[in-house]
Image (cartoon, rainbow, N blue to C red):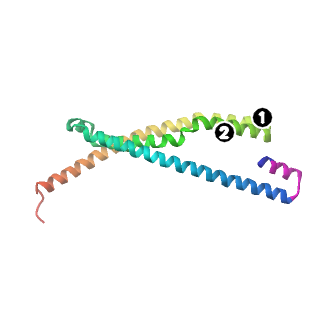
């Protein structure tokens, strides 16, 4: 439709045909947006069910761990397992279909670009995109390192918070607080 609209504008055809092509292009964009939103709605629901199941299983496992192991692991580690690892698996189904659809989309777009722009400009665009992949991987590695540091800090924060709460609980249970 876009190619037809561009050719129509270049040839200077009737205005009403151009308007119809533009409306058809807009309608196809709306349909595409609705379809993608419906897809992501279904996948997000599936992912939420997966995450909930994983957190439930991790919680059950945490309840079966004996006290000495739990003390050696720390509460922060267990909480991170429940939240961070489950969150990673939560994102997996959302983008799993990209394994097959991304190459298909790239090929389709390249064919369309070659038809409209001719081979050289289309291949230059593809080359720039491929050249940016190493930069993206560098950024991803830097984010992963930052995430690892954040997880360690989160472990320490959760451990400290748990110790404070247990201290307050001990003070309250043994009535060691000063009468007010």
Q: Where does residue 104 sit, x and y in percent of width and height? A: 66, 36
Does 129 appear in magenta?
no
Quadrant housing residue 21: bottom right
Residue closer to the observer: 20 or 106: 20
Q: Where does residue 123 sit, x and y in percent of width and height? A: 73, 34
Could you tell me if residue 140 is visible in this image? yes
Q: Where does residue 37 sit, x and y in percent of width and height? A: 58, 52
Does 8 appear in magenta?
yes
Name the element at disc 2: helix
Could you tell me if residue 153 is visible in this image? no
Q: Where does residue 80 sit, x and y in percent of width and height? A: 35, 42
Residue sitting at x 75%, y 57% = 23
Up/down of 66 relative to 32, above or below: above
Question: In the image, which residues are magenta?
Answer: 4-14
Binning the other alpha carbons within 10 Å of mark 2 as few (below 14), some (14 to 19) or many (20 upward) gives: few
Binning the other alpha carbons within 10 Å of mark 1 as few (below 14), some (14 to 19) or many (20 upward) gives: few
Name the element at disc 1: helix
Residue sitting at x 44%, y 48% = 48
- Tell me the CA gap for discs 2 and 1: 19 Å
Q: Nearer the viewer, mark 2 or mark 1?
A: 2
Residue at label 2?
Answer: 105
Which of the numbered marks, if any, corresponds to residue 120?
1
Quadrant housing residue 149: top left
Residue closer to the observer: 123 or 58: 58
* Quadrant into which the C terminus falls: bottom left
User: Of marks 2 and 1, which one's residue comes earlier in the chain?
Assistant: 2
């Amino acid at each position: 439709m876009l190619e037809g609209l561009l050719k129509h504008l270049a040839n200077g055809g009737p205005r009403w045909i151009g308007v119809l092509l533009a409306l058809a292009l807009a309608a196809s964009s709306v349909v595409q947006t609705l379809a993608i939103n419906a897809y992501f709605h279904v996948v997000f629901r599936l992912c939420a069910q997966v995450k909930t199941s994983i957190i439930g299983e991790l919680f059950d496992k945490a309840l079966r761990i004996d006290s000495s192991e739990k003390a050696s692991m720390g509460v922060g580690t267990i909480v991170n397992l429940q939240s961070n690892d489950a969150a990673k698996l939560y994102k997996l189904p959302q983008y799993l279909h990209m394994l097959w659809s991304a190459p298909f989309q790239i090929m389709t777009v390249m064919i369309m670009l070659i038809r409209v722009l001719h081979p050289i400009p289309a291949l230059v665009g593809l080359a720039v995109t491929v050249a940016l992949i190493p930069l993206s991987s560098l950024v991803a590695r830097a984010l992963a390192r930052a995430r690892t540091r954040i997880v360690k800090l989160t472990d320490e924060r959760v451990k400290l918070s748990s110790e404070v709460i247990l201290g307050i609980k001990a003070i309250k249970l043994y009535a060691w607080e000063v009468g007010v």
